[in-house]
Structures are given as structure tokens and as C-alpha cells.
Image: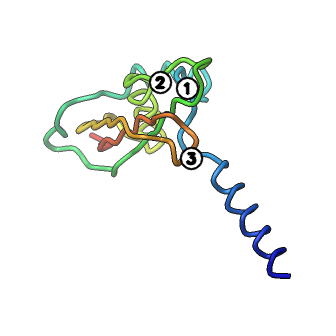
Amino acid sequence: MAVRKSLIVIFLLFVVGCAGGNATAGGGLPNVDPETLRRVQRQIEVSDAVPQGVTRLGEVSSSRGHRSTLQREPTESDVVLELKCAAYALGADGISEVKIEKKSGLMNNYWWVLEGRAMAWKR
């Protein structure tokens, strides 16, 4: 009985470990319809600092992972586009204070992950 329980626990740990992280694999466009992408690119501003007189809506985040040599590696511009999409979904006019870090993704079934964060704001 103890062996059976041990095997079940090992199996569950294996399944959880192989499930992957919450990062989107590879580079390219986010899973958003083309018309929305055009609006996001036109409407969402990117600035270094939060402009004066705007309302902060909160932090948005995005992660892109590199899993396979057959996929295009994610770039910082891929992450910024996803940050802009997340801000657009909040009704924001722009994002600021963009920070992107390259981290190991080995614990989440990626070679590495680009993690981005930004402050969304509305005029």
C-alpha cells in the first residue's frame, strides 16, 4: 500500500512539473484579432515615466518563454506588445515604467523566459 501511494505521489509531481509555466511559448503576435492589434498599436502610448495628471490603473505583466529551437525566440518587442494589449483590455491610454527581465525558465519547461511589467494609466 505504501508503495502504491509513493508511486501516485511521484506520478503527480511529474505531471505538475511537466505542465509548464504561464508564459506564452515563442515569439510573434499575441492571440488577439488583427483589428484589435491595430487599435492597440495606434492607441496605447509607451513612455519612460508616468505622465502628470493621469490615473494609474495598475500594473500589467506578460511572459514569453523560449522552449524549442524550432520556434522563433521571443523578443522584448513581443513582450511590450503583450503589455500594451493587457493595458488596452483595462481601458488604458498608455504604459510606462516598462521593465523586462530575462530569467531562467527551466523550472517551467522553458530554456528561458522574458518577463515584462509596466504601469498602465488613463488620461
Image quarter hosting the C terminus: top left
In this rendering, the answer to whether 38 lies above or below 21 is above
Q: Quadrant of residue 52?
A: top left
Question: Which residue is painted at 27% across and 49% down in the image?
Answer: 56
Residue situated in front as seen by the camera: 117 or 1:
1
Residue highlighted by disc 1: 26
Q: Position of residue 89 (x, y in %)?
A: 48, 40
Question: Which residue is painted at 41% across and 22% down in the image?
Answer: 75
Q: Residues within 10 Å of mark 3 (few under 14, many from 20)?
A: some
Residue situated in front as seen by the camera: 28 or 36:
28
Q: Amino acid at mark 2?
A: Pro
Q: Position of residue 88 (x, y in %)?
A: 44, 36
For marks 3 and 2 on the same chain, the one whose residue lies earlier in the sequence: 3
Tell me the tag on residue 7: none
Residue highlighted by disc 3: 21
SS class, disc 1: loop
Q: Position of residue 83 (x, y in %)?
A: 41, 35
Could you give the CA–CA distance between mark 2 and mark 1, rounded to whole angstroms? 5 Å
Residue highlighted by disc 2: 74
Could you give the CA–CA distance between mark 3 and mark 1, rounded to whole angstroms? 13 Å
In this rendering, the answer to whether 15 lies above or below 69 is below
Q: Are marks 2 and 1 in contact (CB under 8 Å)?
A: yes
Image quarter hosting the N terminus: bottom right
Question: Which residue is painted at 39% across and 45% down in the image?
Answer: 60
Residue situated in front as seen by the camera: 121 or 20:
20
Could you give the CA–CA distance between mark 3 and mark 2, rounded to whole angstroms? 15 Å
Q: Amino acid at mark 3?
A: Gly
For marks 3 and 1 on the same chain, the one whose residue lies earlier in the sequence: 3
Q: Quadrant of residue 70?
A: top right
Q: Residues within 10 Å of mark 1 (few under 14, many from 20)?
A: many
Q: Residues within 10 Å of mark 2 (few under 14, many from 20)?
A: many
Residue situated in front as seen by the camera: 24 or 1:
1
